Image (cartoon, rainbow, N blue to C red):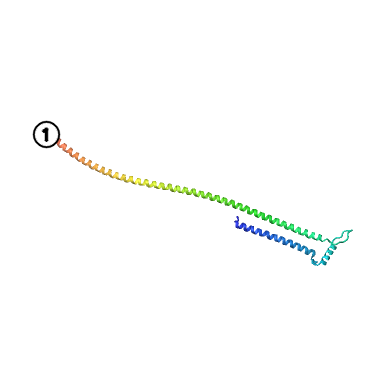
Amino acid sequence: ESLTKPEQLMLFSILEGELEARDVVIEALKAQCRELFIQERYAWYNLSDPFHALQRDSEIAGACTKEPGHSTHAANPLVILKLVVSHCRRMQEKMMSQLAAAESRHRRVIADLEEEKRRHAEDTAEGDDVTYILEKDRERLQQQLEFERSHVRRLEKEQRRITEQLEEERAQHKQLSCALAKECKWASSRALEEGHRLTELSRKLDKEKEASQVLRKEL
């Protein structure tokens, strides 16, 4: 899951606080170890009293092993100090090892955060690329839609023109049909009249022929 910048800053602050708290604990443990070691070594003595300090040195000298041929002598305070320093050094090395492990974990967390940041940047870049592609597709589809709409408008305009032309031609055909019908009716009427006239003329002609024949016979 990707972390936002405020969440990353908050995580860095928490890790920094943990490291500071760890350093404080390490210093406290160092001081506590020194205190415990001194109490174990010198719990029976009042270190502020020089006579008790002499008694302490005497008892420590008596507790030391004696080598053959050597007389008992007072213990060197530097030996005790070296023991304390050695113990503190071991504790310090242990704490430094723990601190190194903590720093390693801290570096690993930082590396993970950087990797997450890089992946987030890549995802954001890919998201920007996808958004750009989608925007280009939207523009292309919008242009195609506008082209289709313009084409449809042209077709509708052409259809209206053709429809008007057909209506006009149909009106002209209707007028022509009416004129032809009237012409045919008039022609039929004239033909009928001419037929009647021809019949009448034929009848008259026949009468004239008969009259002519009668006259010939009389002559």
Q: Amino acid at mark 1?
A: Leu
Q: Position of residue 69 (x, y in %)?
A: 89, 58
In terms of depth relative to the viewer, which is nearer, 3 or 35? 35
Q: Position of residue 34 (x, y in %)?
A: 76, 62
Q: Position of residue 94 (x, y in %)?
A: 74, 57
Q: Residue at x 43, y 47 (%)?
A: 150
- In the picture shown, does residue 72 fall above or below 152? below
Quadrant of the frame with the N terminus: bottom right
Quadrant of the frame with the C terminus: top left
Q: Quadrant of residue 12?
A: bottom right
Q: Residue at x 62, y 57 (%)?
A: 9
Specify whether 109 is left or right of 56.
left
In terms of depth relative to the viewer, which is nearer, 177 or 55? 55
Q: Position of residue 168 (x, y in %)?
A: 33, 46
Specify whether 145 is left or right of 24.
left
In terms of depth relative to the viewer, which is nearer, 29 or 155? 29
Q: Residue under circle 1? A: 215
Q: Secondary structure at mark 1?
A: helix
Specify whether 92 is left or right of 70.
left
Specify whether 188 is left or right of 33.
left
